[in-house]
Every structure is written in structure tokens, then in C-alpha cells.
Image (spheres, rainbow, N blue to C red):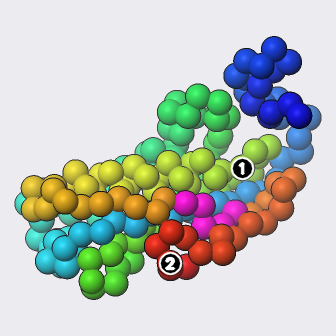
Amino acid sequence: MRLTHQNEKGQASMVDISAKEPSYRTATAKACLHMKSETLALLFEGKLPKGDALGVARVAGIMAAKKTADLIPLCHPLATDSVEISFDHDNKGKLYIYATASCFGKTGVEMEAMTAATVAALTLYDMCKGVEKGIVIKDIYLLEKTGGKSGDYRAESGGDGER
């Protein structure tokens, strides 16, 4: 069986998508940060020493999605139409990041959504580390995707037991 990202010599190569028809595609990724409930409260009250961490993380995630092909070697550069980052929490120390990317193109935006969620999580760690260094970033995964040849996908459940 030939792997999709290898040429006939077994060397890494970018998949040729030139013959594929463009279609509307979306992907949503999720990440979870575990922190002390006191840190979570400071974050959502906007009282962290570094300021508006959620706003900065939102912008960082959007910027990261637009740079995905610069970070992931065999990822195609895409003209993303939209990237949205949202946050939720459980008041017990779990912060959830949702990153949704969309485009009309020949390949999916799963990597853009995953990169956005990851960089938003890293940014939140950076913004909160002055208050708590023991924050753990966990369970970064593709929650769902639509469009493309392989069709729609929705994760059964993530590593955090949530959906």
C-alpha cells in the first residue's frame, strides 16, 4: 500500500490535489486546559496581570490558522474564509477552546482548526503562567469536519470525556 504523503521512492511529498474539485469545507477542533479554579476565575474576570488573555488567545488562534502551511511541512496553503475561536469552562478548572475554520477549496481545513486550537491554548498558558505554572494542555482533537471526498465526520467523544 502506498502512503498518500510519499512518492514512489518512499520520500515525503505533498499530495497532488490539482484534479480535485473545490467544495465548501469546515472543521472544528477542541482543546482543554486544566487549571486551578482560582486561575480560571481570574481569566474570565479579566484580572490576570497580562490583561485580556482570552482576546489575545483568540487573535493568536486566528493568526495561527492562517499560517498553518508554514508550520506543518506537507500541509497545503489555503485561503481560509473564516476562523472563529470560542471559549467555555466548567467553573472547576477546565477551560475549553473551540476553533472552527472554513474555506471553499480542494482540501480540508482540519489542520487549520487544530493549529488554531493549539496556539490559542499555548497563548493562554503564556498569559496565565505568572499566576499558575502547573496548567496542563490536554485533549487537542478534531471535533468535527464537513465537506470533501471523505464526507462529514464527528468525534464520538474526546479524551476529556466531553462533547
Q: Secondary structure at mark 2?
A: loop
Q: Which residue is mark 1?
A: 108
For discs 2 and 1, the disc positioned in front in the rendered view: 2
Kindly report the secondary structure that dominates the magenta region of the rendered protein: strand
Q: Which residue is mark 2?
A: 161
| Outermost front residue | 1
**Location of the N terminus (image quadrant):** top right
Residue 13: horizontal and vertical position, in percent?
73, 23
Relative to 99, 57 lies left or right:
left
Nearer the observer, 136 or 22: 136
Nearer the observer, 2 or 15: 2
Nearer the observer, 111 or 158: 158
**Location of the C terminus (image quadrant):** bottom right
Please give the range of residues in magenta: 141-145
Q: At 78% across and 66% down in the image, what residue appears?
A: 152
Q: In the rendered structure, which amino acid carries the disc numbered 1?
A: Gly
Q: At 13% across and 61% down in the image, what residue appears?
A: 132
Q: Secondary structure at mark 1?
A: loop
Picture layout, residue 43 above or below residue 50: below
Picture layout, residue 70 above or below residue 24: above
